[in-house]
Amino acid sequence: EAGVTQSPTHLIKTRGQQVTLRCSPISGHTSVYWYQQALGLGLQFLLWYDEGEERNRGNFPPRFSGRQFPNYSSELNVNALELEDSALYLCASRIWGGGADTQYFGPGTRLTVL
Amino acid sequence: AQTVTQSQPEMSVQEAETVTLSCTYDTSESDYYLFWYKQPPSRQMILVIRQEAYKQQNATENRFSVNFQKAAKSFSLKISDSQLGDAAMYFCAYRIIRSGTYKYIFGTGTRLKVLA
């Protein structure tokens, strides 16, 4: 069974640019979570999508947005990049229902903003 | 506010020895899940162990076990017979079990070094 995949692996952008990160969940998983992992700050919750809808978002400005597609894959968009957006962005998927309450993480996308 | 605190930024353990990573959390909820995740240098985060708050028995997974103290809001991870492959960042996480609320809160992590 294929795990959670993310693309690209690495990205280098400059301030003010826009970036799109992609995530494909494990087959059968309907929920996708996005996290920002900045150095020394652990994982900060960004967004949660389920069944194509945004269910919750963390304390991030509106320039962080995303969507989930009918096949449950997801995109994270970041507009007007700032230096402090440099981080590892992790995607996780989770299957709905029952006691299956475990997130499975992708390898992440390393974003560097210059 | 729901928070997860890992007070040990870094720990070291000798190979084959036992180490305990600490985690405390703050919540007013009574039903929740607790997790320990491992993030090796290759970055892929994997689940180590999970605990349902309503279960009094501490969870175990092979060499990994937890000491769950609900009243103290403490959830420590014990790694027995440490191996070089255990070297990683370990994150403690928490999620309440309230309908419609599936947000996970993570701690800042503990970097574990295993010495040969």
Image (cartoon, coloured by chain):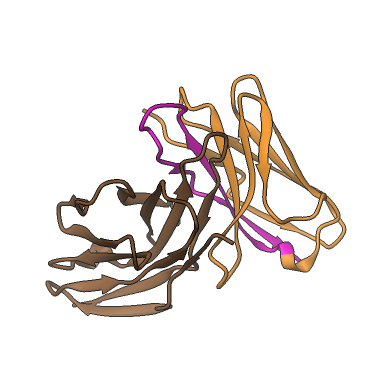
Chain colours: A orange, B brown
Quadrant (top left, top right, bottom left, bottom right) of the N terminus of chain B: bottom right
Image vertical order of residue A89 relative to residue B99, above or below = below
- Identify the magenta region: A85-114
Quadrant (top left, top right, bottom left, bottom right) of the C terminus of chain B: bottom left
Q: Position of residue B74 (x, y in %)?
A: 34, 66
Q: What residue do we see at 25% from left, 72% from top?
A: B20
Image vertical order of residue A65 relative to residue B13, above or below = above
The quadrant in which residue B43 appears is bottom left
Whether residue A88 is visible, yes or no, is: yes
The number of callouts visible is: 0
Lateral position of residue A22 relative to residue A93, left or right: right
Lateral position of residue A88 relative to residue B27, left or right: right
The quadrant in which residue A20 appears is top right
Q: What residue do we see at 12% from left, 67% from top?
A: B81
Looking at this view, is A69 or B64 the one in front?
A: B64
Q: What residue do we see at 77% from left, 68% from top?
A: A83
Lateral position of residue B38 relative to residue A40, left or right: left
Image vertical order of residue B17 relative to residue B64, above or below = below
Q: What residue do we see at 81% from left, 61% from top?
A: A14
The quadrant in which residue B9 appears is bottom left
Q: Position of residue B21 (x, y in %)?
A: 31, 71
Looking at this view, is A81 or B25 the one in front?
A: B25
Whether residue B41 is visible, yes or no, is: no
